[in-house]
């Protein structure tokens, strides 16, 4: 009788263990299913990823940008790193190339602040000849920094403004200002896109969404003016958004990494592309050139070689 009782207890114990394992397995599956549902329907929803990318663009201290424009036999490539804090500065290189009978290949180094642009030629190659049929020699102008500085001391530095005031503004705003700016974007319907038609692809084994976006010009100028005031850019203080009411909307395609919610590429009509990366990497800011000449003087020296 004691043996039967012992076997009965063992049977009950085994059943309890099986039940416990079943409940644990069920809990794991439920958790996994809930996690997948949260990821698929909430975290990785195209709308959430899009606005997450805008929010991340507004909280980065630095990023790299490569701009490429190819038009028939001409090409323009710019590679820069932009720092929005603690210093506002951009540095990088340009290559302008033309392949035809009057072909040339020009490399320049550039540095830009909100107020001043600096440029120097590092290499100039051309098929053109001088009056004696000899190759043009540009050694005398290589390495000389030319400077463009506005007379009114406004923040009209083109290189820096082009980097942070593109179709999506970039910077390092505090949380309250980010929320304020994004709220303004949304209330003004600055960006219009059909989230149901967003395309999902894999790029280097990472999920990427691509959005067809239309930007309302008046609304965007309103946003840029507000952003500029937040980061100390003064040149837009007198700009009136109403002047852009009849300006045609700008269309572009933006690519966003789903995992990081960061802009990776923007494509514009006409073949121009911008590729972004290295967000937040802190390298030493480029040194502002000390010895410079006026940019007009530099251009006159280049033309004098011809």
Image: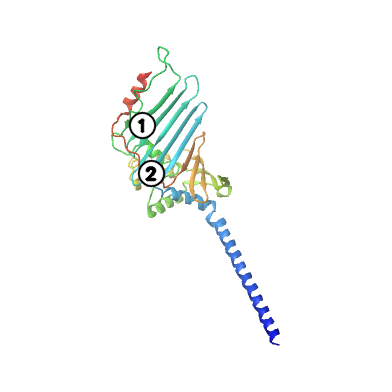
Image mark count: 2
Q: CA distance from mark 2 to mark 1?
A: 21 Å
Residue beneath label 1, please? 119
Q: Nearer the viewer, residue 158 or 261?
A: 261
Label 2: few (<14), some (14–19) or many (≥20) C-alpha neighbours in 10 Å: few
Q: In the figure, residue 22 lies in which quadrant?
A: bottom right
Q: Nearer the viewer, residue 131 or 226?
A: 131
Residue beneath label 2, please? 283
- The tag earlier along the polypeptide, 2 or 1, is 1
- Residue at 38% x, 20% y is 137
- Residue at 48% x, 29% y is 75
- Looking at the picture, does residue 284 appear above or below residue 134? below
Q: Is residue 24 left or right of residue 255?
A: right
Q: Is residue 78 left or right of residue 293?
A: right
What SS does tag 1 mark?
A: strand
The numbered dot on residue 88 is none
- Looking at the picture, does residue 261 appear above or below residue 106? below
């Amino acid at each position: 009788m004691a043996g039967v009782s012992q076997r009965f207890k063992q049977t009950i114990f085994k059943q309890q263990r099986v039940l416990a394992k079943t409940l644990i397995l069920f809990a794991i599956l439920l958790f996994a299913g809930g996690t997948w549902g949260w990821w698929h329907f909430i975290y990785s929803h195209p709308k959430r990823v899009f606005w997450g990318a805008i929010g991340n663009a507004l909280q980065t201290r630095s990023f790299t940008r490569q701009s490429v424009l190819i038009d028939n036999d001409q090409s323009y490539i710019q590679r820069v790193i932009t720092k929005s804090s603690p210093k506002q500065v951009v540095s990088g290189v340009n290559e302008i190339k033309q392949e035809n009978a009057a072909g040339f290949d020009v490399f320049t180094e550039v540095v830009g602040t909100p107020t001043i642009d600096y440029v120097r030629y590092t290499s100039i190659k051309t098929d053109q000849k001088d009056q004696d049929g000899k190759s043009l020699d540009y050694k005398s102008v290589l390495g000389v920094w030319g400077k463009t500085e506005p007379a009114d001391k406004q923040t009209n530095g083109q290189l820096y403004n082009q980097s942070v005031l593109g179709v999506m503004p970039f910077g390092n705003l505090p949380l309250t200002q980010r929320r304020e700016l994004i709220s303004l974007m949304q209330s003004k319907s600055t960006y219009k896109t059909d989230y149901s038609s967003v395309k999902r692809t894999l790029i280097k084994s990472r999920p990427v969404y691509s959005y067809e976006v239309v930007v309302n010009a008046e609304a965007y100028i309103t946003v840029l003016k507000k952003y500029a005031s937040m980061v100390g850019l003064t040149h837009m203080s007198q700009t009136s958004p109403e002047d852009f009411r009849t300006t045609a909307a700008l269309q572009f395609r933006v690519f966003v990494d789903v995992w990081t919610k960061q802009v990776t590429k923007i494509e514009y009509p006409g073949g121009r592309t911008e590729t972004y990366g290295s967000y937040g990497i802190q390298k030493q800011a480029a040194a502002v050139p000390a010895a410079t000449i006026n940019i007009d003087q530099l251009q006159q020296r280049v033309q004098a070689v011809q």
